[in-house]
Image (spheres, grey):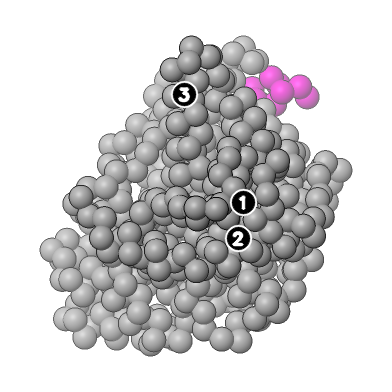
Amino acid sequence: MGAKELIESGKTALGIEFGSTRIKAVMIDLDGNVLATGVYDWENQLKNGIWTYDYDEIDRGFRGCYTSLREDVEKKYGVTIRKLGALGISAMMHGYIALDKDGKPIAPFQTWRNTNTQKAADEMTELFNFNIPLRWTSAHLYQCVLDHEEHLKNVDFVTTLDSYMHYRLTGRKVTGVGDASGIFPIDSTKIDYDAKMMAAFDGLIAKQGYTFKAEDLFPKVLPAGADAGTLTPEGAALLDESGNLEPGVPMAPPEGDAGTGMVATNSVAPGTGNVSAGTSTFAMIVLEKGQTMKKLHREIDMVTTPDGAPCAMSHANNGTTDLNAWVGIFKEFCDLMGVKADMGELFGKLYRHSLEGDPDCGGLLAYGYYSGENVTMLNEGRPLYTRMPESHFNLANLMRVNLYTSLGAVKLGMDILTKEEHVRIDRITGHGGLFKTEGVAQNYLAASINAPVTVMKTASEGGPWGMAVLAAYLIDGEASGLSLGDYLDKKIFAGQEGITVQPDPKDVEGYETFAEHYRAGIPVEKAAIDNLRW
Protein backbone atom coordinates (compact mmCIF):
# COMPACT_ATOMS: atom_id res chain seq x y z
CA MET A 1 0.00 0.00 0.00
CA GLY A 2 0.99 3.60 -0.55
CA ALA A 3 0.85 6.16 2.23
CA LYS A 4 -2.57 7.44 1.15
CA GLU A 5 -4.07 3.95 1.26
CA LEU A 6 -2.47 3.19 4.62
CA ILE A 7 -3.98 6.33 6.13
CA GLU A 8 -7.40 5.67 4.62
CA SER A 9 -7.43 2.09 5.92
CA GLY A 10 -6.10 3.03 9.37
CA LYS A 11 -2.92 0.97 9.09
CA THR A 12 -1.02 3.66 10.99
CA ALA A 13 0.19 4.51 14.47
CA LEU A 14 0.18 7.98 15.97
CA GLY A 15 2.31 9.28 18.83
CA ILE A 16 1.70 12.67 20.46
CA GLU A 17 4.25 13.99 22.95
CA PHE A 18 3.92 17.01 25.22
CA GLY A 19 7.41 18.49 25.31
CA SER A 20 8.46 21.50 27.33
CA THR A 21 8.33 23.96 24.44
CA ARG A 22 6.52 22.00 21.75
CA ILE A 23 3.72 19.45 21.47
CA LYS A 24 4.49 17.21 18.53
CA ALA A 25 2.57 14.49 16.71
CA VAL A 26 4.18 11.87 14.46
CA MET A 27 2.18 9.44 12.32
CA ILE A 28 4.01 6.36 11.07
CA ASP A 29 3.25 3.24 9.10
CA LEU A 30 3.71 -0.07 10.91
CA ASP A 31 7.33 -0.28 9.76
CA GLY A 32 8.18 2.96 11.55
CA ASN A 33 8.34 5.23 8.49
CA VAL A 34 7.16 8.79 9.13
CA LEU A 35 4.04 9.71 7.13
CA ALA A 36 3.14 13.09 8.64
CA THR A 37 3.85 15.37 11.58
CA GLY A 38 2.11 18.13 13.51
CA VAL A 39 3.33 20.72 16.01
CA TYR A 40 2.06 23.24 18.53
CA ASP A 41 4.50 25.58 20.24
CA TRP A 42 3.93 26.53 23.86
CA GLU A 43 5.85 27.60 26.94
CA ASN A 44 5.56 27.05 30.66
CA GLN A 45 4.74 29.93 33.01
CA LEU A 46 5.97 30.75 36.48
CA LYS A 47 2.82 31.47 38.53
CA ASN A 48 2.97 32.00 42.28
CA GLY A 49 6.38 30.38 42.36
CA ILE A 50 5.21 27.28 40.45
CA TRP A 51 6.27 26.28 36.93
CA THR A 52 3.01 25.30 35.24
CA TYR A 53 0.85 25.14 32.12
CA ASP A 54 -2.83 26.09 32.36
CA TYR A 55 -5.20 23.16 31.86
CA ASP A 56 -7.03 25.09 29.13
CA GLU A 57 -3.72 25.55 27.31
CA ILE A 58 -3.04 21.82 27.59
CA ASP A 59 -6.32 21.16 25.76
CA ARG A 60 -5.70 23.89 23.18
CA GLY A 61 -2.22 22.60 22.51
CA PHE A 62 -3.42 19.02 22.20
CA ARG A 63 -6.08 19.92 19.66
CA GLY A 64 -3.79 22.38 17.88
CA CYS A 65 -1.09 19.75 17.47
CA TYR A 66 -3.53 17.21 16.04
CA THR A 67 -5.03 19.84 13.73
CA SER A 68 -1.52 20.59 12.45
CA LEU A 69 -1.01 16.86 11.78
CA ARG A 70 -4.41 16.53 10.08
CA GLU A 71 -3.65 19.49 7.82
CA ASP A 72 -0.25 18.00 6.96
CA VAL A 73 -1.96 14.75 5.94
CA GLU A 74 -4.56 16.59 3.86
CA LYS A 75 -1.88 18.66 2.12
CA LYS A 76 0.43 15.72 1.38
CA TYR A 77 -2.06 13.00 0.51
CA GLY A 78 -5.42 14.68 -0.11
CA VAL A 79 -7.23 12.57 2.48
CA THR A 80 -8.85 13.21 5.86
CA ILE A 81 -7.87 11.11 8.88
CA ARG A 82 -10.84 9.04 9.98
CA LYS A 83 -9.15 5.91 11.33
CA LEU A 84 -5.99 5.21 13.30
CA GLY A 85 -4.46 1.81 13.89
CA ALA A 86 -3.24 2.79 17.35
CA LEU A 87 -2.57 5.90 19.39
CA GLY A 88 -0.22 6.71 22.25
CA ILE A 89 0.34 9.77 24.43
CA SER A 90 3.66 10.72 25.99
CA ALA A 91 4.89 13.75 27.87
CA MET A 92 7.70 15.26 29.88
CA MET A 93 7.98 12.98 32.89
CA HIS A 94 7.24 13.59 36.54
CA GLY A 95 5.34 16.53 37.94
CA TYR A 96 1.97 16.55 39.67
CA ILE A 97 -1.65 16.60 38.56
CA ALA A 98 -4.38 16.07 41.19
CA LEU A 99 -8.00 15.29 40.28
CA ASP A 100 -11.18 14.84 42.31
CA LYS A 101 -13.63 11.93 42.01
CA ASP A 102 -15.26 13.61 39.01
CA GLY A 103 -11.94 13.82 37.17
CA LYS A 104 -11.62 17.59 37.59
CA PRO A 105 -8.25 19.24 38.39
CA ILE A 106 -8.13 20.57 41.96
CA ALA A 107 -4.58 21.97 42.01
CA PRO A 108 -2.27 23.67 39.50
CA PHE A 109 -0.28 21.35 37.27
CA GLN A 110 3.27 21.29 38.65
CA THR A 111 5.85 20.39 36.01
CA TRP A 112 9.13 18.50 36.38
CA ARG A 113 10.84 21.88 36.57
CA ASN A 114 9.67 22.64 40.11
CA THR A 115 12.10 22.22 42.99
CA ASN A 116 9.77 23.07 45.88
CA THR A 117 9.79 19.50 47.17
CA GLN A 118 13.21 19.34 48.86
CA LYS A 119 11.91 18.39 52.33
CA ALA A 120 9.64 15.68 50.95
CA ALA A 121 12.31 14.21 48.67
CA ASP A 122 14.89 14.20 51.46
CA GLU A 123 12.60 12.40 53.91
CA MET A 124 11.58 9.81 51.35
CA THR A 125 15.16 9.20 50.19
CA GLU A 126 16.32 8.64 53.77
CA LEU A 127 13.42 6.30 54.56
CA PHE A 128 13.75 4.21 51.39
CA ASN A 129 17.56 4.42 50.99
CA PHE A 130 16.63 5.09 47.38
CA ASN A 131 17.01 8.40 45.57
CA ILE A 132 13.72 10.26 45.21
CA PRO A 133 14.27 13.25 42.91
CA LEU A 134 12.53 16.53 43.66
CA ARG A 135 10.49 16.36 40.46
CA TRP A 136 8.92 12.92 41.07
CA THR A 137 5.15 12.79 41.46
CA SER A 138 5.34 11.09 44.85
CA ALA A 139 7.65 13.84 46.13
CA HIS A 140 5.11 16.44 45.02
CA LEU A 141 2.29 14.52 46.70
CA TYR A 142 4.19 14.17 49.97
CA GLN A 143 5.19 17.85 49.93
CA CYS A 144 1.49 18.70 49.59
CA VAL A 145 0.88 16.41 52.58
CA LEU A 146 3.59 18.14 54.62
CA ASP A 147 2.12 21.51 53.69
CA HIS A 148 -1.43 20.27 54.42
CA GLU A 149 -2.67 21.71 51.16
CA GLU A 150 -6.41 22.27 51.03
CA HIS A 151 -7.02 20.28 47.84
CA LEU A 152 -5.99 16.99 49.48
CA LYS A 153 -9.38 16.66 51.18
CA ASN A 154 -10.90 16.05 47.73
CA VAL A 155 -8.07 14.17 46.00
CA ASP A 156 -8.98 10.97 44.16
CA PHE A 157 -6.32 10.59 41.44
CA VAL A 158 -2.71 11.79 41.31
CA THR A 159 -0.78 11.36 38.10
CA THR A 160 1.48 12.73 35.35
CA LEU A 161 0.63 14.75 32.25
CA ASP A 162 0.65 11.85 29.77
CA SER A 163 -1.41 9.65 32.10
CA TYR A 164 -3.85 12.54 32.64
CA MET A 165 -4.39 12.99 28.91
CA HIS A 166 -4.71 9.23 28.43
CA TYR A 167 -7.43 9.27 31.12
CA ARG A 168 -9.18 12.09 29.27
CA LEU A 169 -9.13 10.03 26.06
CA THR A 170 -10.04 6.60 27.47
CA GLY A 171 -11.41 6.93 31.02
CA ARG A 172 -8.64 4.52 32.17
CA LYS A 173 -6.41 5.46 35.15
CA VAL A 174 -3.25 3.76 33.92
CA THR A 175 0.28 4.57 32.83
CA GLY A 176 3.28 2.83 31.29
CA VAL A 177 5.89 1.38 33.62
CA GLY A 178 8.55 3.80 32.40
CA ASP A 179 6.35 6.76 33.25
CA ALA A 180 5.36 5.11 36.54
CA SER A 181 9.05 4.94 37.49
CA GLY A 182 8.95 8.75 37.68
CA ILE A 183 5.99 8.55 40.01
CA PHE A 184 7.29 6.05 42.59
CA PRO A 185 10.07 3.41 42.76
CA ILE A 186 9.32 0.32 40.66
CA ASP A 187 9.92 -3.36 41.39
CA SER A 188 11.17 -4.46 37.97
CA THR A 189 10.54 -8.13 38.75
CA LYS A 190 6.82 -7.45 39.21
CA ILE A 191 6.34 -4.44 36.86
CA ASP A 192 4.61 -2.55 39.66
CA TYR A 193 5.28 -0.03 42.40
CA ASP A 194 7.67 -1.36 45.05
CA ALA A 195 5.33 -2.81 47.70
CA LYS A 196 7.70 -2.43 50.66
CA MET A 197 8.44 1.21 49.86
CA MET A 198 4.77 1.90 49.22
CA ALA A 199 3.84 0.60 52.68
CA ALA A 200 6.52 2.82 54.22
CA PHE A 201 5.25 5.78 52.19
CA ASP A 202 1.69 5.22 53.41
CA GLY A 203 3.11 5.30 56.96
CA LEU A 204 4.64 8.73 56.30
CA ILE A 205 1.32 10.01 54.99
CA ALA A 206 -0.62 8.57 57.95
CA LYS A 207 1.68 10.37 60.39
CA GLN A 208 0.45 13.64 58.91
CA GLY A 209 -3.17 12.68 59.63
CA TYR A 210 -4.28 11.51 56.17
CA THR A 211 -6.06 8.19 55.63
CA PHE A 212 -5.68 7.76 51.85
CA LYS A 213 -3.26 5.21 50.40
CA ALA A 214 -0.87 6.44 47.74
CA GLU A 215 -1.30 3.31 45.63
CA ASP A 216 -5.04 4.02 45.41
CA LEU A 217 -4.27 7.51 44.09
CA PHE A 218 -1.60 6.58 41.54
CA PRO A 219 -2.36 5.16 38.07
CA LYS A 220 -2.12 1.41 37.54
CA VAL A 221 1.15 0.24 35.98
CA LEU A 222 1.26 -1.39 32.53
CA PRO A 223 4.17 -2.67 30.40
CA ALA A 224 4.60 -1.85 26.73
CA GLY A 225 2.12 -3.77 24.57
CA ALA A 226 -0.54 -4.06 27.27
CA ASP A 227 -4.18 -3.15 26.67
CA ALA A 228 -4.62 0.41 27.92
CA GLY A 229 -8.15 0.99 26.65
CA THR A 230 -9.63 2.56 23.53
CA LEU A 231 -10.39 6.08 22.38
CA THR A 232 -13.87 7.06 23.58
CA PRO A 233 -16.26 9.30 21.62
CA GLU A 234 -15.53 12.06 24.16
CA GLY A 235 -11.80 11.49 23.70
CA ALA A 236 -12.09 11.64 19.91
CA ALA A 237 -13.99 14.94 20.19
CA LEU A 238 -11.32 16.33 22.51
CA LEU A 239 -8.54 15.39 20.08
CA ASP A 240 -10.05 16.17 16.68
CA GLU A 241 -11.98 19.43 16.54
CA SER A 242 -13.02 18.64 12.95
CA GLY A 243 -15.08 15.69 14.22
CA ASN A 244 -13.79 13.26 11.59
CA LEU A 245 -11.76 10.90 13.79
CA GLU A 246 -13.63 7.73 14.69
CA PRO A 247 -13.53 6.43 18.30
CA GLY A 248 -12.47 2.91 19.24
CA VAL A 249 -8.77 3.39 18.44
CA PRO A 250 -6.58 1.02 20.55
CA MET A 251 -4.50 3.03 23.01
CA ALA A 252 -0.96 2.12 24.07
CA PRO A 253 0.05 2.62 27.70
CA PRO A 254 1.06 6.29 28.03
CA GLU A 255 4.76 6.88 28.53
CA GLY A 256 7.17 9.52 29.75
CA ASP A 257 9.71 11.12 27.47
CA ALA A 258 12.47 9.02 29.01
CA GLY A 259 10.80 5.83 27.79
CA THR A 260 9.98 7.18 24.35
CA GLY A 261 13.58 8.33 24.06
CA MET A 262 14.76 4.79 24.77
CA VAL A 263 12.50 3.43 22.05
CA ALA A 264 13.50 6.16 19.58
CA THR A 265 17.14 5.16 19.99
CA ASN A 266 16.68 1.37 20.27
CA SER A 267 18.03 1.53 23.82
CA VAL A 268 15.96 -0.95 25.83
CA ALA A 269 18.52 -3.78 26.13
CA PRO A 270 21.12 -4.00 28.94
CA GLY A 271 24.29 -2.09 28.12
CA THR A 272 22.57 0.25 25.69
CA GLY A 273 21.97 3.89 26.44
CA ASN A 274 20.82 7.15 24.98
CA VAL A 275 21.09 10.86 25.51
CA SER A 276 18.02 12.99 24.87
CA ALA A 277 18.88 16.64 24.43
CA GLY A 278 16.23 19.32 24.60
CA THR A 279 14.83 21.77 27.14
CA SER A 280 15.85 19.21 29.71
CA THR A 281 18.66 16.80 28.90
CA PHE A 282 19.09 13.31 30.21
CA ALA A 283 21.27 10.27 29.71
CA MET A 284 20.08 6.74 30.44
CA ILE A 285 21.90 3.42 30.63
CA VAL A 286 19.93 0.17 30.83
CA LEU A 287 21.19 -2.17 33.56
CA GLU A 288 21.05 -5.94 33.83
CA LYS A 289 17.84 -7.32 35.30
CA GLY A 290 18.00 -6.96 39.09
CA GLN A 291 21.12 -4.76 38.97
CA THR A 292 21.24 -1.78 41.33
CA MET A 293 23.70 0.98 42.19
CA LYS A 294 26.42 0.12 44.70
CA LYS A 295 25.85 3.43 46.48
CA LEU A 296 23.01 5.90 46.84
CA HIS A 297 23.64 8.85 44.51
CA ARG A 298 21.27 11.81 44.70
CA GLU A 299 22.44 12.79 41.20
CA ILE A 300 21.22 9.51 39.64
CA ASP A 301 17.60 8.44 39.11
CA MET A 302 16.60 4.80 38.87
CA VAL A 303 13.81 4.44 36.31
CA THR A 304 12.77 1.67 33.89
CA THR A 305 12.43 0.96 30.22
CA PRO A 306 8.88 0.72 28.80
CA ASP A 307 9.08 -3.05 29.30
CA GLY A 308 10.27 -2.74 32.90
CA ALA A 309 14.07 -3.20 32.86
CA PRO A 310 16.03 -1.10 35.41
CA CYS A 311 17.71 1.97 34.01
CA ALA A 312 20.11 4.52 35.56
CA MET A 313 19.46 8.08 34.48
CA SER A 314 21.43 11.29 34.79
CA HIS A 315 18.70 13.91 34.38
CA ALA A 316 19.42 17.62 34.02
CA ASN A 317 16.53 20.04 34.40
CA ASN A 318 18.31 22.50 32.11
CA GLY A 319 19.38 21.81 28.55
CA THR A 320 19.08 23.94 25.44
CA THR A 321 16.88 26.83 26.60
CA ASP A 322 19.73 29.31 27.01
CA LEU A 323 21.48 28.01 23.91
CA ASN A 324 18.31 28.74 21.94
CA ALA A 325 18.13 32.21 23.51
CA TRP A 326 21.63 33.02 22.25
CA VAL A 327 20.66 31.97 18.72
CA GLY A 328 17.62 34.22 19.09
CA ILE A 329 19.92 37.15 19.90
CA PHE A 330 21.81 36.58 16.66
CA LYS A 331 18.50 36.43 14.79
CA GLU A 332 17.67 39.88 16.25
CA PHE A 333 21.04 41.16 15.06
CA CYS A 334 20.37 39.83 11.56
CA ASP A 335 17.00 41.59 11.55
CA LEU A 336 18.66 44.79 12.72
CA MET A 337 21.14 44.59 9.85
CA GLY A 338 18.38 43.91 7.33
CA VAL A 339 19.52 40.33 6.73
CA LYS A 340 16.76 37.75 6.32
CA ALA A 341 17.95 34.72 8.26
CA ASP A 342 16.07 31.43 8.37
CA MET A 343 16.19 30.06 11.93
CA GLY A 344 17.09 26.56 10.78
CA GLU A 345 19.97 27.90 8.69
CA LEU A 346 21.07 30.15 11.55
CA PHE A 347 21.20 27.26 14.01
CA GLY A 348 23.20 25.18 11.53
CA LYS A 349 25.73 27.91 10.74
CA LEU A 350 26.31 28.85 14.39
CA TYR A 351 26.57 25.22 15.51
CA ARG A 352 29.05 24.36 12.75
CA HIS A 353 31.05 27.50 13.46
CA SER A 354 31.56 26.26 17.03
CA LEU A 355 33.76 23.50 15.60
CA GLU A 356 36.37 26.20 14.94
CA GLY A 357 36.53 27.01 18.64
CA ASP A 358 39.09 25.78 21.16
CA PRO A 359 38.55 22.26 22.59
CA ASP A 360 38.17 23.77 26.09
CA CYS A 361 36.01 26.69 24.83
CA GLY A 362 38.93 29.05 25.30
CA GLY A 363 38.29 29.38 29.02
CA LEU A 364 34.68 30.57 28.65
CA LEU A 365 32.10 29.29 31.14
CA ALA A 366 28.30 29.27 31.04
CA TYR A 367 25.38 27.80 32.98
CA GLY A 368 22.02 27.69 31.22
CA TYR A 369 20.17 27.33 34.52
CA TYR A 370 16.68 28.68 33.95
CA SER A 371 15.48 26.56 36.86
CA GLY A 372 16.96 24.57 39.71
CA GLU A 373 19.38 21.79 38.82
CA ASN A 374 19.22 18.56 40.80
CA VAL A 375 22.57 17.24 39.52
CA THR A 376 24.43 20.18 41.07
CA MET A 377 22.04 20.43 44.06
CA LEU A 378 20.74 23.93 43.29
CA ASN A 379 17.04 24.62 43.84
CA GLU A 380 16.87 27.74 41.69
CA GLY A 381 18.55 28.83 38.49
CA ARG A 382 20.21 31.92 37.07
CA PRO A 383 21.43 31.80 33.45
CA LEU A 384 25.05 32.81 33.75
CA TYR A 385 27.92 33.50 31.37
CA THR A 386 31.42 34.46 32.49
CA ARG A 387 35.08 34.32 31.50
CA MET A 388 38.54 35.19 32.66
CA PRO A 389 40.20 38.37 31.33
CA GLU A 390 42.64 36.25 29.33
CA SER A 391 39.99 33.88 27.94
CA HIS A 392 39.81 33.48 24.18
CA PHE A 393 36.53 35.30 23.56
CA ASN A 394 35.15 34.87 20.05
CA LEU A 395 31.95 33.68 18.38
CA ALA A 396 33.13 30.10 17.89
CA ASN A 397 33.98 29.69 21.57
CA LEU A 398 30.77 31.44 22.65
CA MET A 399 28.71 28.93 20.69
CA ARG A 400 30.90 26.03 21.75
CA VAL A 401 30.57 26.82 25.46
CA ASN A 402 26.79 27.05 25.16
CA LEU A 403 26.69 23.70 23.39
CA TYR A 404 29.07 22.17 25.96
CA THR A 405 27.09 23.47 28.92
CA SER A 406 23.81 22.11 27.54
CA LEU A 407 25.40 18.70 28.28
CA GLY A 408 27.34 19.85 31.36
CA ALA A 409 25.11 18.65 34.19
CA VAL A 410 24.45 15.34 32.43
CA LYS A 411 28.23 14.90 32.07
CA LEU A 412 28.63 15.04 35.87
CA GLY A 413 26.02 12.30 36.29
CA MET A 414 27.55 10.14 33.57
CA ASP A 415 30.93 10.40 35.30
CA ILE A 416 29.33 8.85 38.39
CA LEU A 417 27.95 5.96 36.35
CA THR A 418 31.11 5.26 34.36
CA LYS A 419 33.90 6.21 36.77
CA GLU A 420 32.38 5.28 40.15
CA GLU A 421 29.72 2.64 39.44
CA HIS A 422 31.55 1.16 36.41
CA VAL A 423 28.29 0.68 34.53
CA ARG A 424 28.77 -1.18 31.24
CA ILE A 425 28.05 0.87 28.12
CA ASP A 426 27.97 -0.99 24.79
CA ARG A 427 26.24 1.66 22.72
CA ILE A 428 25.10 5.28 23.18
CA THR A 429 22.61 6.87 20.81
CA GLY A 430 21.77 10.57 20.72
CA HIS A 431 18.36 11.98 19.82
CA GLY A 432 16.45 15.23 19.94
CA GLY A 433 16.74 18.50 18.11
CA LEU A 434 20.25 19.26 19.42
CA PHE A 435 21.62 16.54 17.12
CA LYS A 436 19.88 17.76 13.98
CA THR A 437 23.01 19.59 12.78
CA GLU A 438 25.26 16.72 11.76
CA GLY A 439 28.67 16.31 13.37
CA VAL A 440 28.44 18.99 16.08
CA ALA A 441 26.60 18.14 19.30
CA GLN A 442 27.19 14.46 18.50
CA ASN A 443 30.95 15.08 18.54
CA TYR A 444 30.72 17.02 21.80
CA LEU A 445 28.67 14.28 23.47
CA ALA A 446 31.22 11.67 22.39
CA ALA A 447 33.94 13.84 23.92
CA SER A 448 32.03 14.35 27.17
CA ILE A 449 31.54 10.62 27.83
CA ASN A 450 34.65 9.43 25.95
CA ALA A 451 32.62 6.83 24.04
CA PRO A 452 31.26 6.37 20.51
CA VAL A 453 27.89 8.04 19.85
CA THR A 454 25.41 7.09 17.14
CA VAL A 455 22.69 9.34 15.76
CA MET A 456 19.93 7.73 13.69
CA LYS A 457 18.13 9.43 10.82
CA THR A 458 15.04 9.72 13.06
CA ALA A 459 17.01 11.61 15.74
CA SER A 460 15.21 14.92 15.24
CA GLU A 461 11.78 13.20 15.49
CA GLY A 462 12.74 11.93 18.94
CA GLY A 463 10.15 11.01 21.55
CA PRO A 464 6.94 11.47 19.51
CA TRP A 465 8.26 8.97 16.97
CA GLY A 466 9.19 6.64 19.85
CA MET A 467 5.63 6.91 21.19
CA ALA A 468 4.25 6.13 17.74
CA VAL A 469 6.46 3.03 17.66
CA LEU A 470 5.09 1.95 21.05
CA ALA A 471 1.59 2.38 19.62
CA ALA A 472 2.56 0.25 16.62
CA TYR A 473 3.98 -2.39 18.96
CA LEU A 474 0.59 -2.62 20.65
CA ILE A 475 -1.10 -3.84 17.46
CA ASP A 476 1.81 -5.28 15.49
CA GLY A 477 4.74 -6.41 17.61
CA GLU A 478 2.96 -7.88 20.61
CA ALA A 479 0.66 -9.90 18.36
CA SER A 480 3.68 -11.58 16.79
CA GLY A 481 5.04 -12.59 20.17
CA LEU A 482 8.14 -10.42 19.94
CA SER A 483 9.61 -8.74 23.01
CA LEU A 484 9.94 -4.99 22.72
CA GLY A 485 13.70 -5.30 22.21
CA ASP A 486 13.32 -7.90 19.45
CA TYR A 487 10.56 -5.87 17.81
CA LEU A 488 12.82 -2.82 17.65
CA ASP A 489 15.80 -4.83 16.38
CA LYS A 490 14.00 -6.96 13.81
CA LYS A 491 11.22 -4.68 12.60
CA ILE A 492 11.78 -1.00 13.29
CA PHE A 493 15.55 -0.54 13.20
CA ALA A 494 16.45 -3.32 10.77
CA GLY A 495 18.44 -1.62 8.03
CA GLN A 496 18.07 1.85 9.51
CA GLU A 497 20.88 4.22 8.71
CA GLY A 498 22.89 5.86 11.43
CA ILE A 499 26.10 7.82 11.80
CA THR A 500 28.58 6.87 14.51
CA VAL A 501 31.43 9.11 15.63
CA GLN A 502 34.38 8.18 17.78
CA PRO A 503 35.57 10.62 20.46
CA ASP A 504 38.40 12.88 19.33
CA PRO A 505 41.20 12.72 21.97
CA LYS A 506 41.74 16.50 21.75
CA ASP A 507 38.04 17.14 22.32
CA VAL A 508 37.96 14.65 25.20
CA GLU A 509 40.83 16.51 26.88
CA GLY A 510 39.20 19.86 26.14
CA TYR A 511 35.83 18.78 27.52
CA GLU A 512 37.47 17.49 30.71
CA THR A 513 39.07 20.92 31.16
CA PHE A 514 35.68 22.55 30.61
CA ALA A 515 34.15 20.12 33.16
CA GLU A 516 36.77 21.18 35.72
CA HIS A 517 35.82 24.82 35.12
CA TYR A 518 32.13 23.84 35.33
CA ARG A 519 32.58 22.20 38.74
CA ALA A 520 34.75 25.04 40.02
CA GLY A 521 32.20 27.66 38.96
CA ILE A 522 29.19 26.14 40.75
CA PRO A 523 29.73 28.40 43.81
CA VAL A 524 29.53 31.36 41.41
CA GLU A 525 26.14 30.10 40.16
CA LYS A 526 25.06 29.64 43.78
CA ALA A 527 26.13 33.20 44.61
CA ALA A 528 24.10 34.46 41.66
CA ILE A 529 21.05 32.62 43.02
CA ASP A 530 21.61 34.05 46.50
CA ASN A 531 22.12 37.64 45.37
CA LEU A 532 20.20 38.21 42.13
CA ARG A 533 16.58 38.61 43.28
CA TRP A 534 15.04 41.50 41.38
Query: Per the image, is 248 magenta?
Result: no
Secondary structure under the numbered disc 2 in the rendered image: helix
Callout 1 environment at 10 Å: few (<14), some (14 to 19), or many (20+)?
Answer: many
Q: Amino acid at mark 3?
A: Phe
Secondary structure under the numbered disc 1 in the rendered image: helix
Label ID, residue 361: 1
Q: Amino acid at mark 2?
A: Phe
Callout 2 environment at 10 Å: few (<14), some (14 to 19), or many (20+)?
Answer: many
Secondary structure under the numbered disc 3 in the rendered image: helix
- Marks 2 and 1 close (CB-CB < 8 Å): yes
User: For the point 40% across and 68% down, which residue is it?
Assistant: 523
Q: Which residue is mark 3?
A: 333
- Marks 3 and 2 close (CB-CB < 8 Å): no
Magenta highlight range: 1-13
- Whether residue 301 is visible to the viewer of this picture, yes or no, is no
Q: Nearer the viewer, residue 153 or 40?
A: 40
Q: Which residue is mark 2?
A: 514
Q: CA distance from mark 3 to mark 1?
A: 23 Å
Q: Nearer the viewer, residue 330 or 129?
A: 330
Q: Residue 328 location in percent, x, y?
A: 46, 31
Q: Residue 228 location in percent, x, y?
A: 51, 53
Above or below, 12 relative to 271: above
